[in-house]
Image (cartoon, rainbow, N blue to C red):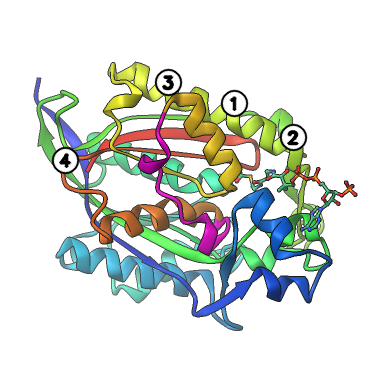
Amino acid sequence: MSTIRTIIAGTGSYLPARVMTNDDLSKIVETTDEWIVERTGIHSRHIAADGELTSDLALAAARAAIADAGIDAQEIDTIILATTTPDYTFPATAVTVQAELGLHHGAAFDIQAVCSGFVYALTIADTFIRTGQSKTALVIGAETFSRLLDWTDRTTCVLFGDGAGAVVVKGAAGEGTNADRGVLTAHLHSDGRYKDKLYVDGGPSSTQSTGHVRMEGREVFRHAVVNIAEAITESLAATGLNADDIDWFVPHQANKRILDGTAKRIGLPPEKVVLTVAEQGNTSAASVPLAFDTAVKDGRIKKGDLVLLEAMGGGFTWGSLLLRF
Ligand code: ACO
C-alpha cells in the first residue's frame, strides 16, 4: 500500500570551540578523571562561549543540515527546535532560527521534553509530514546545558555539555513496508510521577529565575535502562523487525554505562552502537542528532541502513524511533 514516509534529507551539527576536560573540572569541584571516566565514560565536553546562545548553536547545525540536504532554505515550512535551554523564556528559540534563515512563512516552535526532546521533535515532524501539514521540516536539538549547571555540585556538573544537531526531513512516497526509506515507527512516553528525580529547581512561574539541575542519579540510572529497553522493544514489535535487523543504534548519550546496559538488554553488539558521550558528555536534546550526524559524516550510517534512535530524560520522558536512512 503506497504511503508517505518522512525521510532524512540532510544532517548537520555544531559544537562550541571550548573543550572542558575532566582534569579542568577537577580544578572546580572535588572529582577526578578516573571517577568520571569509570562511572560515565565521559572524558571531555564542549562549553558555549560567553554570549554564544542556544540559537547560535542551533543555527550553525541547521545551516549544515540544509547544505547537506542540498535544498534552498525557503523550502522549509516547519521548524521544530527541541531545547531545555531556550535563549529567552519567550519567544521560542525556533523563531530566532527562522528569522536568521530568512524565512517568513510556515511555523516555528520549540518543544520541551528535556533529553528526549529530539526524538519527540522528530516524531512530531513525522506526523506533520504524513498528514500533509508540512512538506519539508527542519528538526533541531540544541542546548547550552552548561548554563543550568550548579558548578559546585560534582554529582551533576561533570555529566553535561553544550552542542546542537539538526536534520532536514521531507515527505517521500513509500510502499508501506519496512524496506521503505524514512521513519518506520515511533513511540513516545512520559510519567510525571518521577518529575522530582531529575529537574531544574527554578522557572518563570515558580521562582522567577532559571534554577539549576538537580538529580537522583541512581534512580535515573535504574529507570533509564528499563524504560529505554521497553521503548525499543515496542518499536521492534510494531514493525515485526528484530534486534539483528538494526544496522546502527543511535542512543541519547547520557552515560556509557546506561548505553552498554541497554545494548546488552536488547542484544545489540557494541560495534553497532554510535557513541559520542566520551568527547561530548550529555548534551540533552542535542545528543541524538549530534551522534547521528557524526555517524553519517564518518561513513558508518549509509543510505538504506536501519537506524534505531532512543532517548530518556527528565519528567521522566522517553521514546524510540526506527528509521531507514
Ligand atoms: N567525583 C567524585 N566522586 C563523586 C562524584 C564526582 N563527580 N559524584 C559523586 N561522587 C561520589 C558520591 O558523593 C558518592 O560518595 P559517597 O559514597 O562517599 O557518598 C560516590 O561518589 C558514589 O555516588 P553515587 O551517586 O552512588 O554514584 P553512582 O555510581 O550512582 O554514579 C552517576 C553517579 C554517574 C550520576 C550515576 O548514578 C548515573 O550515571 N546516573 C544516571 C544519571 C544520568 O545519566 N543523568 C543524565 C540525565 S538523564 C538521562 O539523560 C538519561
Circle nearer the N terminus (1, 3): 1
Residue position marked by numbered label 4 in the rendering: 304
- The location of residue 198, given as percent across then percent down, is 72, 44
Mark 3, other Cα within 10 Å: few <14 / some 14–19 / many ≥20: some
Secondary structure at badge 3 equals: helix
Earlier in the chain: of badge 2 and badge 4, it is 2
Q: Mark 4 vs mark 3: give the one in front.
A: 4
Q: Distance between the residues labelled 1 and 2?
A: 11 Å
Q: Give the residues in magenta.
A: 268-283
Secondary structure under tag 1 reads helix
Quadrant hosting residue 173: top left
Which residue was labeled with disc 2?
Answer: 219
Numbered circle sitting on residue 36? none
Q: In this view, does 151 lie to the left or right of 48?
A: right
The response on whether ligand 1 sits within 8 Å of label 4 is no
**Structural distance between the alpha carbons of marks 4 and 3:** 22 Å
How far is disc 2 from disc 3 in space, using C-alphas?
Answer: 23 Å
Q: Which residue extends farthest bottom?
A: 50
Residue type of the residue flagged with mark 2: Glu
Could you tell me residue 196's position as x and y percent? 77, 39
In primary-sequence order, the first of circles 1 and 2 is: 2
- Residue 39 placement (x, y as % from top left): 68, 49
Say which amino acid is labelled 1: Val
Q: In this view, does 126 lie above or below 144?
A: above
Q: Name the residue under label 3.
A: 234
What type is the residue that disc 4 sits on?
Gly
